[in-house]
Image: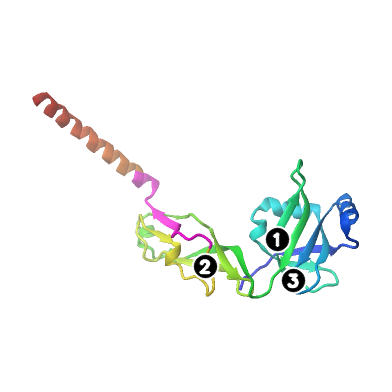
């Protein structure tokens, strides 16, 4: 299970319709609704500054939240829509969906690395690059992994880890069909530069021979 699901505190909104929504915005709130889960929809307000900050952090629509509303049980939700002002592009209304344990959702799951201390490529001075610190997976709401682990213990310089080599939690699968790279071990910058210089030197040595052959012709 995920170790830390962020809280999102909201207030129950009294009144419905455009008038109540306009009043919420005048009070520095963003009106919204929580629906689904075989219970009645719940009108809510979220402080504008709180919501705006979370939107700027990114991946808001693929983040699972523990919504807390006074007088109601905490519930896991995921954003389904953010309506914005046509000119200012600021949030004006937000929709959340309650999740059952069996609901399938897309979430970004953190990647952890195992085997760095014994990797032959790293022992030779190779550099590990984590191309995807997070991987987007389709998971069930009741069984969300805290992370996935990649093993680099046998990787040499030039090797990489792709999603197909990772043991994913039961019921989880990538949102991307192709076998994409998560991490790789590359040669250190100094070694790479030296190799490039050697290749340039070899090309320079071949040039006189090529000129001689051209002269003989």
As for residue 217 lying within the magenta part, the answer is: no
Which residue is the site of mark 2?
Answer: 173
SS for dot 3: strand
Query: Callout 3: 10 Å neighbours few (<14), some, many (20+)?
Result: some
Would you say the residues marked 3 and 2 are in contact, meaning their CB atoms lie under 8 Å apart? Answer: no
Q: CA distance from mark 1 to mark 3?
A: 13 Å
Q: CA distance from mark 3 to mark 2?
A: 25 Å
Horizontal and vertical percent position of residue 24: 87, 54
**In percent of the image, x 83 and y 62: which residue is there?**
44
**In percent of the image, x 76 and y 43: which residue is there?**
86
* The residue positioned farthest toward the top in the image shown: 215
Viewer-nearest residue: 134 or 170: 170
**Side of 117 relative to 89 (left or right):** left
Horizontal and vertical percent position of residue 185: 40, 56
Viewer-nearest residue: 95 or 7: 95
As for residue 182 lying within the magenta part, the answer is: yes
The mark closer to the camera, 1 or 3, is: 1
**Side of 45 relative to 75 (left or right):** right
Which residue is the site of mark 1?
Answer: 79
Residue 197 sits in which quadrant? Answer: top left
**In percent of the image, x 23 and y 35: which residue is there?**
203
Horizontal and vertical percent position of residue 151: 43, 66
Which residue is the site of mark 3?
Answer: 75
Quadrant, the N terminus: bottom right
Q: CA distance from mark 1 to mark 2?
A: 21 Å
Range covered by the magenta-colored residues = 175-192
């Amino acid at each position: 299970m995920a170790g830390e699901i962020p809280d999102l505190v909201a207030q129950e909104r009294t009144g419905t319709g455009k008038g109540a929504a306009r009043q919420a915005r005048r009070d520095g709130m963003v009106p919204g609704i929580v629906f689904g889960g075989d219970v009645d929809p719940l009108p809510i307000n979220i402080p504008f500054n709180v919501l705006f900050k979370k939107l700027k952090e990114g991946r808001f629509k693929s983040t699972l939240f523990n919504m807390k509303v006074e007088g109601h049980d905490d519930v896991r939700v995921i954003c389904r829509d953010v309506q914005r002002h046509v000119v200012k592009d600021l949030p004006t209304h937000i929709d959340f969906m309650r999740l059952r344990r069996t609901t399938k959702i897309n979430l970004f799951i953190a990647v952890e690395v195992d085997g760095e201390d014994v990797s032959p490529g790293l022992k030779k001075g190779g550099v590990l690059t984590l191309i995807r610190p997070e991987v987007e997976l389709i998971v069930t709401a009741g069984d969300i992994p805290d992370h996935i682990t990649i093993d680099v213990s046998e990787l040499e310089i030039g090797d990489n880890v792709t999603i197909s080599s990772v043991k994913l939690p039961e019921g989880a699968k990538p949102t991307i069909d192709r076998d994409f790279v998560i991490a790789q071990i590359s040669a250190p910058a100094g070694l790479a530069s030296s190799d490039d210089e050697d290749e340039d030197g070899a090309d320079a040595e071949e040039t006189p021979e090529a000129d001689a052959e051209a002269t003989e012709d």
